[in-house]
Image (cartoon, rainbow, N blue to C red):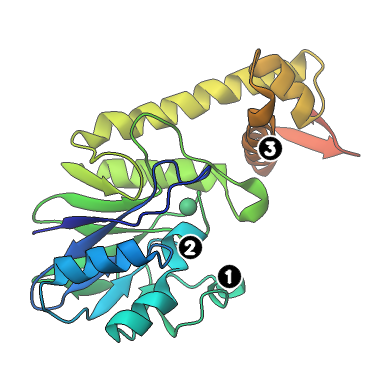
Amino acid sequence: MNAVPVFACNPGPITGDGNWTWFIPGEVPTLIDAGTGERAHLDGVHEALAGAALRQVLVTHGHVDHASGAPALRERFGVTRFLKWPWPDRDTKWPVEWQPLGDGDRVQAGDVDLAAIHTPGHAPDHLCFWHEASRTVFCGDLAIKGTSVWIPARLGGNLAAYLASLERIAALEPARMLPAHGPVIDDPVPLLRDYVHHRLEREDQIIAALRAGATTPEEVVARVYRGLRVSLVPLAVESVTAHLLKLQQEKRAQVHDRAWNMIDP
Ligand SMILES: [Zn+2]
């Protein structure tokens, strides 16, 4: 399978250098992720198409840097087929006719078949696209080499689901992952296992902070992330909140009037 990276040209505080979208040439010219509609991205897609017509856009999830370019792609290339896992509250923000993709659905892309794999956690609608013959995963925001992935608890992020998604993709034993941010991941299984390990280590630190008397996410952050730059505190609070919600889901922690504590066995 030939997958061509097309840079979305949208650097920023959340996207880092900017997003990668992936073009798959062949019988059904397909773009994975829509970018944000930057003119330079549309020009990059045009170049990758080399005269072919763009037939469809598969979207990994509804975050702005992955989905908001859909109307611009429709306008520029006349493409009408946009597919993603439905996230009704959010999908209407990007006004194209989204077609639903479910877990295990197969879609022809270029000259091959891809399988959609529901991998919630970073976002409730997150899909990976799996090409079994080359053991390649288009992994969206499941993993970013060199950093950890943001789990926005208040925007449908779910840490327990995220860990299950990491395990699910690791179990496929992919040979490479093509992400939406950062470099290609050539040895994905150790990275996925590291991610799980890192989160569980963090969870132990958060449990220790609760047991030592911290009760709010802010107090946990002050204990666990010592010396953190002030500008990064809100992200750390969000991440700790995701951990606390996971512990609550597992009936290991509880919250009353914003004060968290462990449920001792
Ligand atoms: Zn995202």
Near-viewer residue (253 or 80): 80
Q: Which mark is residue 241?
A: 3
Q: Is residue 33 visible?
A: no
Near-viewer residue (34 or 117): 34
Determine whether the beta carbon of the residue marked 1 sits less than 8 angstroms from the nearest atom of ligand 1: no
Residue in view at x 42 percent, y 61 percent:
66
- Rounded to the nearest whole Å, what is the CA distance between mark 3 and mark 1? 22 Å
The residue that label 2 is drawn on is 125
Q: Where 106 sits versus 44, above or below?
A: below
Q: Marks 1 and 2: CB-CB under 8 Å? A: yes
Quick one: label 1 or label 2, which is nearer the N terminus? 1
- Rounded to the nearest whole Å, what is the CA distance between mark 1 and mark 2? 10 Å
Neighbours of disc 3 within 10 Å: few (<14), some (14-19), many (20+): many
Count the numbered circles shown.
3
Whole-percent x, y for residue 160 in the image: 54, 43
Kindly identify the amino acid type of the residue bearing the numbered disc 2.
Asp
The residue that label 1 is drawn on is 90
Kindly state the secondary structure of the residue where label 3 is placed.
helix
Q: Marks 3 and 2: CB-CB under 8 Å? A: no
Kindly identify the amino acid type of the residue bearing the numbered disc 3.
Thr
Quick one: label 3 or label 1, which is nearer the N terminus? 1
Determine whether the beta carbon of the residue marked 2 sits less than 8 angstroms from the nearest atom of ligand 1: no
Whole-percent x, y for residue 70 in the image: 41, 74
- Rounded to the nearest whole Å, what is the CA distance between mark 3 and mark 2? 20 Å
Whole-percent x, y for residue 186 in the image: 18, 36
Quick one: label 3 or label 2, which is nearer the N terminus? 2
Residue in view at x 68 percent, y 37 percent:
241
Neighbours of disc 2 within 10 Å: few (<14), some (14-19), many (20+): many
Kindly identify the amino acid type of the residue bearing the numbered disc 1.
Arg
Viewer-nearest of discs 1 and 2:
1
